[in-house]
Amino acid sequence: MIVQGHKSVECRLTKIPCPPFRRIAPGEKVLLKESAGPVQAEAVVKNVLFFENLTPAAIKKIHRKYNNLIMGADDFWQARQNCRFCTLIWLEKVEKITPYRLKTRGMQAWLIREEHDITSLKI
């Protein structure tokens, strides 16, 4: 949905503070990758918000305020009612690229490649 221009904000809700929570900043490049598939696009981080110590009520507030940009289905929000951390990432300059495979370790949904200052996001 990001690559197609339907969505401009990525939402990561987690039970523990794992990347990209407090590990991403405006100006960084993000690689957009299909789950179990190749990297298909690049984007630049425009803005980031972090939330912690969330409650179900706080998650409902985030849902109401930002879902028009996040485009999360009801089951997305329902499955994350017990999360405690949230990262909202505004993306801009989304560009399709020639697809390529990225070697990853395990089933991580977010990788930090500090040596290249590039973050990878599975879409």
Image (cartoon, grey):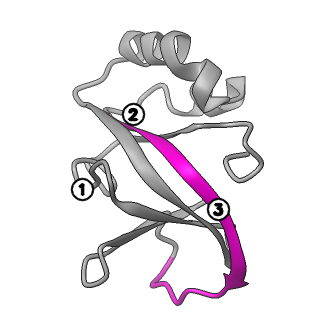
Please tell me which residue lies in front, 91 or 108.
91
Residue 50 visible: yes
Residue 60: numbered disc: none
Label 1 crowd (10 A; few <14 / some 14-19 / many >=20): few
Q: Quadrant of residue 75?
A: top right
Mark nearer the viewer, 1 or 3: 3
List the residue tagged with mark 2: 83
Tell me residue 113's x, y (percent): 33, 78
- 36 vs 69, left or right, is right
Label 1 is placed on what type of residue?
Answer: Arg
Q: Which residues are magenta?
A: 86-106
Please tell me which residue lies in front, 122 or 25.
25
Whether the magenta-drawn stretch holds residue 70 is answered as no
- Point out the tag, 1 or 3, that comes first from the N-terminus: 1
Judging from the image, what secondary structure is the residue with disc 1 in? Answer: loop
Q: How many discs mark residues in the rendered view?
A: 3
**Quadrant occupied by the N terminus:** top right
Q: Residue at x 36, y 38 (%)?
A: 47
List the residue tagged with mark 1: 23
Residue 95: numbered disc: 3
Above or below, 97 relative to 88? below
